[in-house]
Image: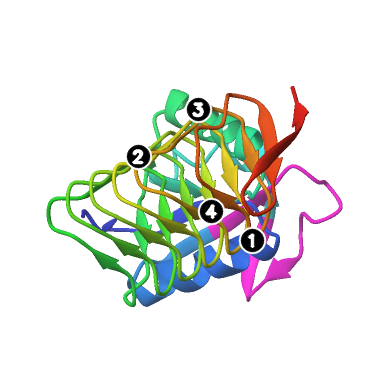
Amino acid sequence: MDIPDGPMIVYGSGGHAKVVVDILQRMGIGIAALLDDDPGKAGGTFLDIPVCLAREYLKTARRNQIQQAIVAIGDNRARLDRAAQLTGMGFQLVTAVHPAAVIAGSATLGAGTVAMAGVIVNSGACVGENVILNTGCTVDHDCRIGDGAHISPGVHLGGNVTIGRRAHVGIGACVLPGVCIGEDAVIGGGAAVIRDVLPGVTAVGVPARMIRQA
């Protein structure tokens, strides 16, 4: 994993950003500013880092030699939208991995993805871009996780699980080996997913059952 030579920017200044900032600092990465779309937050500080209005700061960031960024927004769709904006402006998205995460040598993590403390990603797993691997989740061998997905704290994915783009697997859920969860699907906290979940479906319970379809 390439560590930025100079300071970078973090897009977001909420609770999720607080964890991302801690990971980056533990990695020895300097943070020039936090960006937010809310004018009411601009001009203040968050974790002793200046908060700037995104649309104003981004006009000059590249001229000031800021080249790396990460999006620290919990909402999956918004995170992908801001990531696309940044890459379209020429920023390189940084992958953030907590020192207490365990990532197999044959596993891959896409640009902009965050792996928090206690995360385990086993052999052959492929994690897409701008994914949140939240605290203490496990991703077993040969899983495939699509761009912008969120694997919540304490989730356990068996081997060969597929998670679609922008899907959200809730806290403490478990997914049996070989199961496919479609893009934009939502899995409720504590659910046990024993069969495939179609795109856009919300499924909850033990075993998980559909309660809503997009």
Q: Which residue is mark 4?
A: 10
Place of residue 121 in the rendered image (x, y in percent of width and height, measured from the top left): 29, 58
Element marked by disc 1: loop
Give the CA distance from mark 1 to mark 2: 19 Å
Q: Which residues are magenta?
A: 33-51
Mark on residue 190?
1
Camera-nearest label, 4 or 2: 2
Residue 38 forms part of the magenta stretch: yes
Give the CA distance from mark 3 to mark 1: 32 Å
Give the CA distance from mark 2 to mark 3: 30 Å
Camera-nearest label, 2 or 3: 2
Give the camera-side residue of 92 and 111: 111
Quarter where residue 180 is shown: top left
Element marked by disc 4: strand
Q: Which residue is mark 2?
A: 178
Camera-nearest label, 4 or 1: 1
Give the camera-side residue of 29 and 151: 151
Q: Earlier in the sequence, mark 4 or mark 1?
A: 4
